[in-house]
Image (cartoon, rainbow, N blue to C red):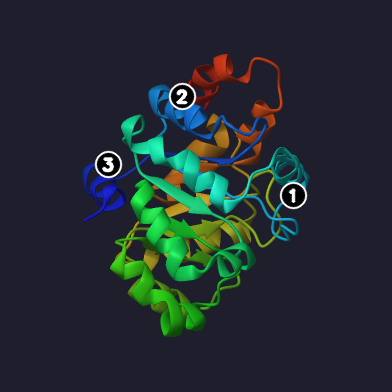
């Protein structure tokens, strides 16, 4: 049982995860930001590793990736930074990014480095499910890493059941099929989607992401899932002067 499983066994609802891009706005602040988020009350974290072609991301996270790459961030640099992670941060931490940099780094090596750094799970939006199951699942299992699958409003029930079968921590529910950074839209069709997922009584907890930016959207998401992920709104805060001092207030405003 890793930290994610322990968290979900203890806390069943209103879980708050925060996403931020490693190396943004400054190269060497990754662990400092993670530590500040834990102290402010985040339940778990997603650290994004930048990529030059982040197709699922909106302009805010795209900009953070571009800046991080210019700052010199890479997977090798990130793993060097994360060597001090577990001496300072206790909550679950996931890495999130695209498949291409992982393949270039070497997937087996990536999983070993992540585990050595104390990472609990990986989110790779463009990793096909069949490819994961056929080629990479053993590397994740050998290193006690959870692979987090994404579900959209268009995902079939058959595929969702398969994802639930392959998952061992939580399932990431996208609030829409658009890019990151929009506002949570709760049309009748989206509410029906959330209700449909809830009625399936999946084995794994669900966490909603994309469009969660304030207490209203966080609370609404938590009506349908075990928690929610805030990404673009927090990355915007990191672009402001004095961002470290603003982190406690940001988290407090989300959770209220």
Query: Label 3 belongs to which residue?
Result: 11
Whichever of labels 2 and 3 marks the residue nearer the N terminus, that label is: 3
Residue 219 can be seen, yes or no: yes
Q: Position of residue 52 (x, y in %)?
A: 75, 56
Q: Nearer the viewer, residue 68 or 56?
A: 68
Q: Earlier in the sequence, mark 1 or mark 3?
A: 3
Relative image position of residue 107 (x, y in whole percent): 49, 69
In the image, is 97 to the left or to the right of 248?
right
**Residue 15 in view of the camera:** no
Q: Which residue is painted at 64% across and 44% down in the image? A: 73
Which residue carries the number 2 mark?
36
- Element type at marker 1? loop
Left or right position of 30 against 93: right
Question: In percent of the image, x 47 and y 62: which residue is there?
Answer: 110
Q: Is residue 116 left or right of residue 194?
A: left
How far apart marks 2 and 3 lie (CA) works out to: 21 Å
Image x and y of residue 152, in percent: 58, 66
> Does 203 appear above or below 20?
below
**Which disc, if any, is residue 58?**
1
Dot 3 falls on a residue whose secondary structure is loop
Q: Residue at x 52, y 69 (%)?
A: 106
Question: Of callouts 2 and 1, which one flags the residue occurring earlier in the amino acid sequence?
Answer: 2
List x then y, in percent, for residue 140.
37, 68
């Amino acid at each position: 049982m890793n930290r994610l499983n322990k968290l979900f066994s203890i806390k069943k609802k209103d879980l708050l995860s925060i996403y931020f891009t490693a190396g943004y706005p400054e190269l060497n602040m990754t662990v400092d930001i993670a530590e500040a988020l834990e102290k402010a009350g985040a339940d778990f974290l997603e650290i994004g590793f930048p990529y030059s072609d982040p197709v699922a991301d909106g302009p805010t996270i795209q900009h953070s990736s571009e800046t991080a790459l210019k700052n010199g961030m890479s997977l090798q640099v990130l793993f060097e930074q994360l060597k001090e992670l577990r001496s300072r941060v206790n909550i679950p931490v996931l890495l999130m990014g695209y498949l291409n940099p992982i393949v270039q780094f070497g997937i087996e090596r990536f999983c070993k480095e992540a585990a050595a750094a104390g990472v609990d799970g990986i989110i790779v939006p463009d990793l096909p499910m069949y490819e994961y199951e056929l080629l990479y699942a053993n590397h994740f299992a050998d290193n006690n890493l959870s692979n987090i699958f994404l579900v959209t409003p268009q995902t079939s029930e058959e595929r969702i059941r398969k994802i639930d079968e392959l998952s061992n921590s939580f399932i990431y529910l996208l609030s829409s099929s658009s890019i990151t950074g929009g506002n949570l839209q709760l049309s009748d069709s989206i509410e029906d989607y959330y209700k449909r997922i809830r009625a399936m009584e999946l084995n794994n907890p669900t966490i909603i992401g994309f469009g969660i930016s304030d207490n209203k959207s966080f609370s609404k998401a938590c009506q349908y899932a075990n928690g929610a992920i805030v990404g673009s709104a927090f990355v915007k805060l990191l672009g402001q002067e004095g961002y470290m001092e603003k982190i406690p207030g940001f988290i407090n405003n989300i959770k209220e």
